[in-house]
Image: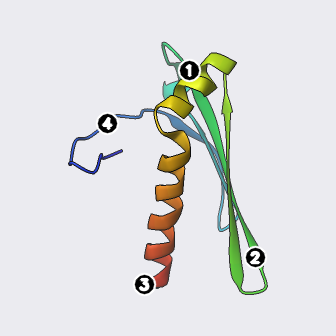
């Protein structure tokens, strides 16, 4: 990730599932291949569904613990994922 001020924030992980135009699933539970990370934090499930020529984008995040979820919320989880959706919409608008 890159912050608004240009700082890179490393977020290692692996994709668990890729279904073209439908679904992405990734996790930080592994750093690469099947090497476990020191502290897994979350698994993300993104789905894209056709809704009459429009796309419904759904982002779900599964945290390992309630404390992880609370930490993620304090880090700006909701705002950050909202920005991701806005940026995705900007990209799609140029296609």
Q: Residue drawn at (26%, 40%), measured in percent from left and top?
A: 8
Residue 70, by quadrant, is top right
- Specify the label residue 94 is tagged with: 3
- Compute the Cα span from label 4 to label 1: 16 Å
Label 2 packing within 10 angstroms: few (<14), some (14-19), many (20+): few
Q: Earlier in the sequence, mark 3 or mark 2?
A: 2
Decide which of 17, 12 is in the foreground and name it.
12
Residue at image mark 2: 50
Query: What secondary structure is marked by label 2?
Result: strand
Query: Which quadrant is the N terminus positioned in?
Result: top left
Residue 54 sits above or below residue 56 on the image? below
Relative to residue 28, is residue 64 drawn left or right? right
The total of numbered circles placed on residues is 4
- Compute the Cα span from label 1 to label 2: 32 Å
Q: Earlier in the sequence, mark 4 or mark 2?
A: 4
Q: Earlier in the sequence, mark 4 or mark 1?
A: 4
In the displayed image of the protein, which residue is found farthest to the right?
Answer: 52
Residue at image mark 1: 40
Q: Residue drawn at (75%, 76%), measured in percent from left and top?
A: 50
Relative to residue 52, is residue 61 drawn left or right? left
Label 4 packing within 10 angstroms: few (<14), some (14-19), many (20+): few
Query: What secondary structure is marked by label 4?
Result: loop
Residue 44 sits above or below residue 57 on the image? above
- Compute the Cα span from label 3 to label 4: 27 Å
- Compute the Cα span from label 3 to label 1: 35 Å
Q: Are marks 4 and 1 in contact (CB under 8 Å)?
A: no
- Specify the label residue 9 is tagged with: 4
Residue 94, by quadrant, is bottom left
Residue 11 sits above or below residue 50 on the image? above
Q: Specify whether residue 41 is in view.
A: yes
Query: What secondary structure is marked by label 3?
Result: loop
Q: Earlier in the sequence, mark 3 or mark 4?
A: 4
């Amino acid at each position: 990730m890159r912050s608004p001020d240009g700082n890179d924030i490393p977020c290692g992980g692996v994709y668990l599932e890729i279904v073209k135009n439908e679904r992405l699933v990734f996790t930080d539970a592994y750093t690469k291949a099947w090497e476990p990370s020191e502290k897994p934090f979350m698994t993300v499930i993104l789905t894209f569904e056709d809704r009459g020529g429009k796309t419904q984008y759904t982002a779900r995040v599964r945290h390992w613990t309630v404390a992880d979820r609370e930490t993620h919320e304090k880090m700006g989880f909701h705002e950050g994922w909202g920005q991701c959706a806005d940026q995705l919409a900007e990209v799609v608008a140029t296609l």
